[in-house]
Image (cartoon, helix red, strand yellow):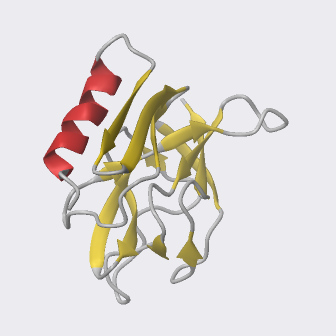
Amino acid sequence: MVDFDLLKKLIEMVKNEDISGITIEDKGTKYEIKRERGGVVMSNPPSLQTSNTPVSHIQQSTPDVDEDLLAITSPMVGTFYSAPSPDSPAFVKVGDNVNSGKVVCIVEAMKLFNEIESEVSGTIVKILVENGKPVEYGQKLMLVKKG
């Protein structure tokens, strides 16, 4: 069983301290949490997530794209939802301004709905995934222009 409280503490430590990352092995499973430009990435993430726990994950977009664009990526394998329910409006749409901490979508994994938050303030310039489609760990969900 994965100790989610320990993982949260390790992620916060990497975010807040002046370290580039940490690797931990627990009962034969190795977790590597490292700081990347714009956020923290956990390789070999656990397949279970706690419900109602906002998750944020962001990475710099590819170099051939505008340097002011950041990609909000999926921190897990699951199903992308742009709105909290089928009859609700989308969390964000192209052209919307977002602040750090704003919920931009939901990724459902194993019947748990995980709110994905933006870690950057800016404008949504492109949504890369259709509502209800499966997403992979690290897959780009949307692009945000810093500002």
Residue appearing at x 36%, y 10% in the figure: 18
* Direction from residue 98 to residue 26 in the image, left or right: left
Residue appearing at x 35%, y 58% in the figure: 46
The C terminus lies in quadrant: top right
The quarter holding residue 90 reads bottom left
* Direction from residue 93 to residue 48 in the image, left or right: left
Q: Is residue 111 above or below residue 129?
A: below
Residue 60, x across and y down, in percent: 63, 35
* Direction from residue 25 to residue 43 in the image, left or right: right
The residue most toward the front is 28
Q: Is residue 95 above or below residue 14?
A: below
Q: Is residue 134 above or below residue 127?
A: below
Residue 112, x across and y down, in percent: 27, 75
The quarter holding residue 68 reads top right
Residue 98, x across and y down, in percent: 43, 45
Q: Is residue 7 above or below residue 113?
A: above
The quarter holding residue 11 reads top left
Residue appearing at x 53%, y 79% in the figure: 131
User: Which of 44 and 11 lies nearest the eye of the viewer?
Assistant: 44
The residue most toward the right is 64
The residue most toward the left is 5
Task: Residue 116: tell me if it is visible.
Answer: yes
